[in-house]
Image: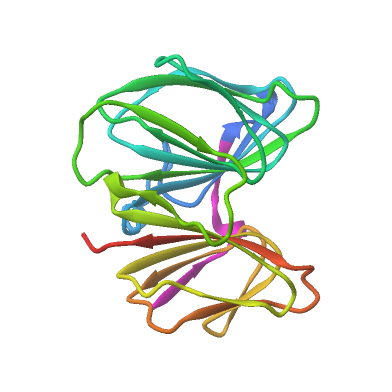
Amino acid sequence: MIDVRRSGGRYRGGEPGAGIETFHAFSFGPHYDPDNVRFGAVLACNEERLAPGAGFDEHPHSHTEIVTWVTEGELTHRDSAGHETVVRPGDVQHLSAAGGVRHVERNDGAVPLVFLQMWLSPLTPGGEPSYEVVHGIADSTPYAVPAAGALLHVRRLGAGERTAIPDAPFAYVHVVRGEVGLGGEKLLSGDAARITGAEGLEAVSLPGGGGAELLVWEMAGR
């Protein structure tokens, strides 16, 4: 089954007056939809847009696997475990909040910052926080989040190129840019598909879209 969710249907949040715009794909904060709380391990898929100098002051997280993908600009991250990094397009950032951690996320650059942040539910709560950045991850190298029973696949396709969607109990596909054909549906930038029980499914970068970039979560059953 393929459940397509359009970019325009996301809940809009953030603080525009502070230079923060957010688009939520799932229930988040004051926005609660009991039919849209999670899919597989995915609890949140937030597109964040930060103006230069804007950001999120120190705040806590716990019992959450947080994976971030920057599409434009640079994200400055600092946390209570002493990590301080700059995350750029092509990098995968993973913060395992585990039993609890605090962090700061800011746009300290001179140009707007756009990033996608995905929260996953751990199989077992608690533990010690951890942090990792993989710089310039390759398409052929899936990024494992074993604590959530999930793999992230980055797919960059030229016009007309195809990629297989993993055969898995749950797959979540987010179109970062471009136009994609999937299961008879046309997905545009910001659109997503929630796929249950995928078998032999492919995504294709449609001609005229200038190529495409996809983030594909492969998730075990729960």
Q: Is residue 44 above or below residue 84?
A: below
Left or right side of 79 for 154: right
Place of residue 197 in the rendered image (x, y in percent of width and height, measured from the top left)? 32, 76
- Residue 77: tell me if it is visible: no
Left or right side of 200 for 175: right
Splitting the image into 4 quarters, where does residue 114 fall?
top right
Q: Which residue is drawn at the image coordinates 30% and 29% (left, top)?
A: 62
Place of residue 219 in the rendered image (x, y in percent of width and height, measured from the top left)? 33, 61
Place of residue 189 in the rendered image (x, y in percent of width and height, measured from the top left)? 67, 61
- Residue 63 magenta-highlighted: no
- Residue 4 magenta-highlighted: yes
- Residue 101: tell me if it is visible: yes
| Picture quarter with the C terminus | bottom left
Segment tinted magenta in the rendering? 1-13
Left or right side of 172 for 98: left
Q: Which residue is drawn at the image coordinates 57% and 49% (left, top)?
A: 137
Q: Is residue 142 above or below residue 164?
A: above
Total marks shown come to 0
Q: Which residue is drawn at the image coordinates 45% and 14% (left, top)?
A: 82
Left or right side of 57 for 189: right
> Which of these two is toward me, 106 or 185?
106
